Image (cartoon, rainbow, N blue to C red):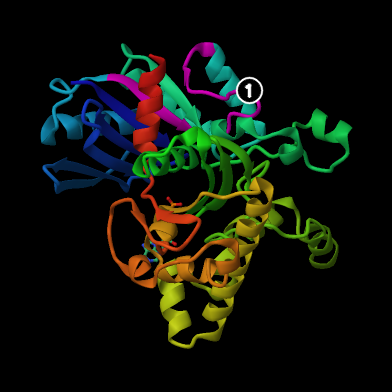
């Protein structure tokens, strides 16, 4: 049996998942959060035969290294045993790989320095990812550690797609270009769709809509990302839970001049206080749709803005690709929201896109088609699994 441990580390938390890779099944997963406080929290979930059993604990956790010790204790006390399932490698999600990293990479001291160097582009994420790598290397010193970048899948974007029409000297000096994110998910679901349809990935043009708290769209041609909605940072593109997505950059000049907002305030406003939440006061799509359906005008307006932007990207990517075979919905909203899927694709019959209402409304955790048999474009819901994709890519390089 071949086990891989996958780590997704934030600044005060990390998620982990142990996978058995011969059958590609999850053995256990968990979350350590509020690291650095006396009230840190561990949730350790041991799934067996589809039955999940949870262990939770609140305690002081000093730092990430301590957090990994607490995780190891949970495995030892509650299973599954890491002696029976010793990880052959640890895979780490890293947010920003810049233009340097385009494939999964074994961690060396130089790779670590390069990830730190890219903190300039992802100041909140890369340092936290490095903290996770350092702590995990102490906990698992004898196995290779591999980094899988959110940006890597988008390194195939052509220059016309990744270049901003910004002064070229400035752009080059400060590494300003579109990088794109959620790449692990876009890659995974576009490949799963091809398998599900028994089609050659190389022959498919796909539009992938990853709609979670963060949201992005990608045009995938022959398995390669050719356009994507997130940019230098994850702020660009679709309307998100708390992020604006696309907005005239001059809004920030205006707010700086008129409201005396500084960079930190603008960053917080655009990233944390806007999007669905900023429009309606609600962050969760379930609540938004429920309120919109109950006649709450603000909620309805916010959902309309969300859908309008989504449709704009679907149309834009359709034009970029010229021909579209599949449209894929994934992540929390994409996998679950009947309303968002219906509204985003409403009225597109002329483009060969026809959603079947009964198929769209059927609940399932499996990959499924929701377009009608007459629809020229096949519309699918494909549950994403970023941890499995990270584990696959980790195994591919060791
Ligand atoms: P993250 O980007 O944090 O990984 P997820 O992919 O888990 O986010 O997606 C979170 C979003 O999915 C939330 O907005 C949540 O409301 C939405 N969501 C989850 N379940 C449903 C559901 N049944 N119907 C509509 N939206 C849902």
Q: Is residue 62 magenta?
A: no
Q: Position of residue 280 (x, y in %)?
A: 55, 75
Please identify the quarter of the rendering in which residue 133 is found: top left
Q: Which residues are magenta?
A: 88-109
**In the figure, is residue 330 to the left or right of 365?**
right
- Circle 1 sits on which residue? 100
Asked which secondary structure carries label 1, the reply is loop
Residue at 41 percent across and 36 percent down: it is 8
The vertical placement of 271 against 129, above or below, is below
Q: Nearer the viewer, residue 169 or 219?
A: 219
Q: Residue furthest front?
A: 374
Q: Is 103 contained in the magenta span?
A: yes
Residue 244 in percent (x, y) is at: 64, 60
Residue 32 or 305: which is nearer the viewer?
A: 305
- x then y, percent, for residue 85: 17, 23
Q: What residue is rendered at 22% in x and 35% in y?
A: 25
Q: Quadrant of ligand 1?
A: bottom left
- Residue at screen point 27% across, 41% down: 30
Badge 1 crowding class, 10 Å Cα cut-off, few under 14, some 14 to 19, many 20 or more, is few
Residue reaching furthest to the bottom = 295
54 versus 142 height, above or below:
below
Quadrant of res 154: top right
């Amino acid at each position: 049996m071949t086990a891989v441990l996958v780590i997704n580390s934030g600044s005060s938390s990390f998620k982990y998942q142990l996978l058995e890779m011969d059958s590609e099944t999850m053995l256990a997963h968990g979350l350590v959060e509020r690291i650095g406080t006396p009230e840190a929290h561990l949730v350790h979930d041991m799934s067996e035969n589809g039955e999940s059993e949870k262990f939770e604990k609140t305690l002081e956790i000093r730092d990430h290294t301590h957090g990994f010790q607490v995780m190891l204790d949970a495995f030892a006390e509650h299973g599954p045993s890491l002696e029976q399932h010793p990880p052959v490698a640890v895979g780490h999600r890293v947010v920003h790989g810049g233009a340097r990293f385009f494939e999964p990479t074994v961690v060396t001291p130089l790779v670590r320095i390069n990830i730190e160097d890219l903190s300039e582009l992802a100041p909140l994420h890369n340092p936290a990812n490095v903290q996770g790598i350092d702590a995990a290397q102490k906990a698992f010193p004898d196995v290779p550690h591999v980094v899988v970048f959110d940006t890597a899948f988008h390194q195939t974007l052509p220059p016309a797609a990744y270049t901003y029409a910004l002064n070229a000297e400035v752009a080059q000096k400060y590494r300003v270009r579109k990088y794109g994110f959620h790449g692990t998910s876009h890659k995974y679901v576009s490949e799963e769709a091809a398998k599900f349809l028994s089609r050659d990935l190389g022959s498919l043009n796909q539009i992938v809509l990853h709609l979670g708290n963060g949201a992005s769209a990608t045009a995938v041609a022959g398995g390669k990302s050719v356009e994507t909605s997130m940019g230098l940072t994850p702020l660009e593109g679709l309307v998100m839970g708390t992020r604006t997505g696309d907005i005239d950059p001059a809004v920030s000049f205006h707010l700086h001049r008129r409201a005396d907002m500084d960079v930190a305030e603008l960053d917080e406003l655009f990233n944390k206080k806007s999007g669905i939440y900023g429009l309606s006061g609600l962050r969760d799509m379930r609540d938004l749709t429920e309120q919109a359906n109950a006649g709450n005008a603000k909620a309805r307006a916010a959902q309309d803005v969300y859908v309008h932007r989504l449709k704009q990207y679907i149309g834009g990517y359709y034009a970029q690709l010229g021909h579209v075979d599949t449209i894929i919905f994934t992540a929390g909203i994409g996998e679950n929201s009947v309303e968002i899927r219906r509204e985003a694709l409403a009225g597109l019959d002329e483009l060969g896109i026809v959603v079947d209402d009964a198929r769209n409304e059927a609940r399932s955790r499996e990959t499924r088609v929701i377009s009608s048999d007459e629809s020229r474009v096949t519309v699918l819901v494909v549950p994403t699994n970023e941890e499995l994709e990270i584990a696959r890519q980790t195994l591919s390089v060791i």
